[in-house]
Image (tube, rainbow, N blue to C red):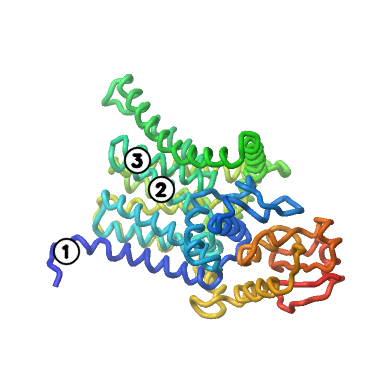
Amino acid sequence: MPDKAFWRVISPWILPVLALVVFSVYALTLVFSVGVGCADDAYHAVIAKNLALGRGYTSTIQDGRTDFLALQFDPRVGVGPVIIFPASLIIRIFGNTYWAPGLAHVLLWSSLCIGIGLLTRKYQSGAGLSLAALSFFYLGFALMTFHFEQWYALLGEIPAALLIILAVLLFFHHNSGLYQCLAGIALSLAAQAKLLSLLAFAVFILCLAIFQMSDRSKKVPARLKELIHRTVYLSIGFIIPVLTFEIWKLFELGPSGYMNNVGSYVSFVKNKGIDHGQALSLLALYKARAAIIYDRFGIALQSVGFMLALAGLLISRDKKLWRIYIVFVSMIIFYLFWWIFISVGWARYFIIPLILIIGAASLPFLASYHRKWLWLYFILIVIWPAGTWDRLAYPSSFIDSGYFNPTKRTESLLKTSNMLARAHSKNRIITQWWATAADLEYISDSHLIFTTYRDEPYKQATPYLIAADTRFVDPNDKEFIELVNSCRGLSNADIYLVYKCE
């Protein structure tokens, strides 16, 4: 029998580990049922597959093109190597199965959660640690029922947000150059998961400057010297992953190709990161974006402010947690300002600040409070997303063939891919646009098998096949619909269409 000392060491970890395991296993049920299914995740999976099979960091299906090609370091991809490399490794081991990208994703964020858990033990190793873990995973599910694909599909928002949290905890874990450098590396990896994380890096530097210059225990020259040292170590850590990846790109693309790639990437970021639509008043923008948050995540913006203010009040006496809280809240404020007033207002762009909000709201459990107050706050945490309780079963609604079994849509994907492999000749298969063929391109045994119907040379070489994922077909595209109707159907499936044109 284990002795009492062993149980004293292991008991604080039982509930946090159990919460992580339950949450991860639930995500895996969707990985092994739904597989690739969000278009964007299939786009990323295509690159990971090509890398795993020796074709380089290459996309073979692209956004914004009428003809697909083998494009190295595709500048229109929304994620970076932090997401692609783990998926490539899993695909290399298991092949381009429908579940490999999702498995890599769950393994990645689960590992980050373990790292965060080990660092938070510095602040609380008792019941508070368990409540903090339960709070984080409960809110991570309840507030994201309509966007739970972020936890099981090959997307970058969750890893990016967790890397930001990890970076902050690393920086304040120990006042040494090593941990400051590690924090910089984590922030850099976050930016390589989603470029939007650069905003967190900028805010973090600003917070450090404010912390350092407001320290009245030291003279101004000493404060400046310490600030410079910390910033240098943080920046060195940040530069290492970025420089490594950019040097690789430079060698692969050459100077001219590299500069063209950078220019295309900047244009892509400007187009996707800033709203170029009709100008609205600040009040109208706020109301419109607040409505999106309530609709997609089930909480009012005012309640976010209340919960963050309450969390700050509860940890205001803990100097170590207070600095972490201020950093999180500062990041959240800047993200909210950007998302409400500058961005295109897509719900998925709110995921990073949402995870930071969940992290900040869970911080009070790590403070030294009587258990009565911790439980009262936990009850408030449970009640906070009450507006989402009627949709808690929504993620499970996608599982229509039993847990860990492929859904009907996934089975249709596999059957359609096999049909195309048997039916198509040397000519590439016609599709509507990248999203209607990304999952078929990933799951196929070959590569570069698709082009769009606007690529005229391929339409002239009859006979040819048309294939598309019907979920992403634009029904208002009359030209494509007419083309499909003029051809002979080979598949009666309502999820994927396959037609032969002669």
**Point 32% across, 64% down: residue:** 17
**Point 31% across, 50% down: residue:** 119
- Please state which of residues 99 and 361 is positioned toward the viewer in this rendering: 99
- Please state which of residues 493 and 313 is positioned toward the viewer in this rendering: 493
Q: Is residue 186 left or right of residue 219?
A: right
- Residue 364, position in %: x, y? 33, 51
Identity, as a three-letter code, of the amino acid under mark 1: Phe
| Residue 498 - label | none
Q: Residues within 10 Å of mark 2 (few under 14, many from 20)?
A: many
- Please state which of residues 292 and 137 is positioned toward the viewer in this rendering: 137
Identity, as a three-letter code, of the amino acid under mark 2: Ile
Q: Is residue 364 left or right of residue 50?
A: left
- Residue 430, position in %: x, y? 77, 63
| Residue 165 - label | 2
- Residue 231, position in %: x, y? 39, 31
Which residue in the protein does label 1 denote? 6
Identity, as a three-letter code, of the amino acid under mark 3: Phe
Which residue in the protein does label 3 denote? 171
Residue 303 visible to an observer of this rendering: no
Q: Secondary structure at mark 3?
A: helix
On screen, 335 above or below 469? above
